[in-house]
Image (spheres, grey):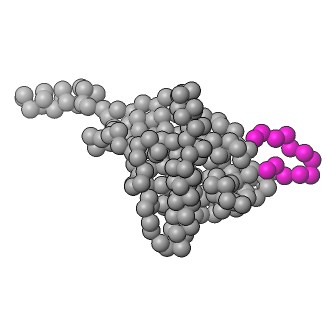
């Protein structure tokens, strides 16, 4: 009889079991972080890192791996890259790169739709994902003309696991709506982000 009651209590009080943490919140970039980014963008470290990442992106497309490693996403509807946290990156430059990429997207005509942070517990580790979401500027349709989608919608993520940097990912997803022009080539987006014309 006690086995029956134990099983019954377990079924009734299942909610007492440990539920993994999952929290999502909106946030904004602090003024001090923006000021730090503005001065860092004028530094030699910034120029060297941007040049190295851009070179490694093209290396990866040619089948060559170098550090920090860049991963390429290539499909008809979504294109992007991820940057692994490796030398010569450090926690400060990693965070600065994330913000620098967001600034470059704004400079290319994108509008920031959101900036949020998601914290979730996965296998006794805490994964934190900070994510910018960008869209092309809103345009009223002009009769007989298609709307520009630039390179599509862009999601930019920075992921840390147990407070240790993991990767930054940028993904451009194209519209397949007949009201929109075809998305511009992803390589042009990369050129614009890394200012290579």
Task: Characterize the magenta stretch by its predominant secondary structure.
Answer: loop
Of the pair 6 and 79, the residue shown nearer to us: 79
Q: Nearer the viewer, residue 172 or 187?
A: 187
Residue interval drawn in magenta: 137-148
Left or right position of 45 against 16:
right
124 sits to left or right of 22: left
- Asked if residue 59 lies left or right of residue 184, the reply is left
* Quarter assignment of residue 51: bottom right
- When the figure is inspected, residue 125 is found, relative to residue 170, above or below; the finding is above
Residue 80 position in % (x across, y down): 57, 57
Which x, y percent locates residue 127?
37, 41
- Which residue is pictured at 55% across the width and 50% down the height? 44
Q: Nearer the viewer, residue 118 or 180?
A: 118
Instruction: Kindly give the residue lying farthest to the front in the view shown.
Output: 44
Classify the position of the N terminus by image quarter. Answer: top left
- Residue at the image point whose x is 52% and y is 54% from the top: 49
In the rendered image, residue 194, in percent from the top left (x then y), is placed at 63, 55
Q: Is residue 29 magenta?
A: no
Q: Residue furthest right?
A: 143
Q: Position of residue 103 (x, y in %)?
A: 63, 41
Which quadrant would the C terminus be assigned to in this image? bottom right
| Residue 160 visible, this orientation | yes
Name the residue: 48% across, 49% down.
168
Count how many numbered circles sit on residues in the image: 0
Residue at the image point whose x is 55% and y is 41% from the top: 40
127 lies above or below 51: above
Look at the image and tell me whether residue 135 can be seen.
no
């Amino acid at each position: 009889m006690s086995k029956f009651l134990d099983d019954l209590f377990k079924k009734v009080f299942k909610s007492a079991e440990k539920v993994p943490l999952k929290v999502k919140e909106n946030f904004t970039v602090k003024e001090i972080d923006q000021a730090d980014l503005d001065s860092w963008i004028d530094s030699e470290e910034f120029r060297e890192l941007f040049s190295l990442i851009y070179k490694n992106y093209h290396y990866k497309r040619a089948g060559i791996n170098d550090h920090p490693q860049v991963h390429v996403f290539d499909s008809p509807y979504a294109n992007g890259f991820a940057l692994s946290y490796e030398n010569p990156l450090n926690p400060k430059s990693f965070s600065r790169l994330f913000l620098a990429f967001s600034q470059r997207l704004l400079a290319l005509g994108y509008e920031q739709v959101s900036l949020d942070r998601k914290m979730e517990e996965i296998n006794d580790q805490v994964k934190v994902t900070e994510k910018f979401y960008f869209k092309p500027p809103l345009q009223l349709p002009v009769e007989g003309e298609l709307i520009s989608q630039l390179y599509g919608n862009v999601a930019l993520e920075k992921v840390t696991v147990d407070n240790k940097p993991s990767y930054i990912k940028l993904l451009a997803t194209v519209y397949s709506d007949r009201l929109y022009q075809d998305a511009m080539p992803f390589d042009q987006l990369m050129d614009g982000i890394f200012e290579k014309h």
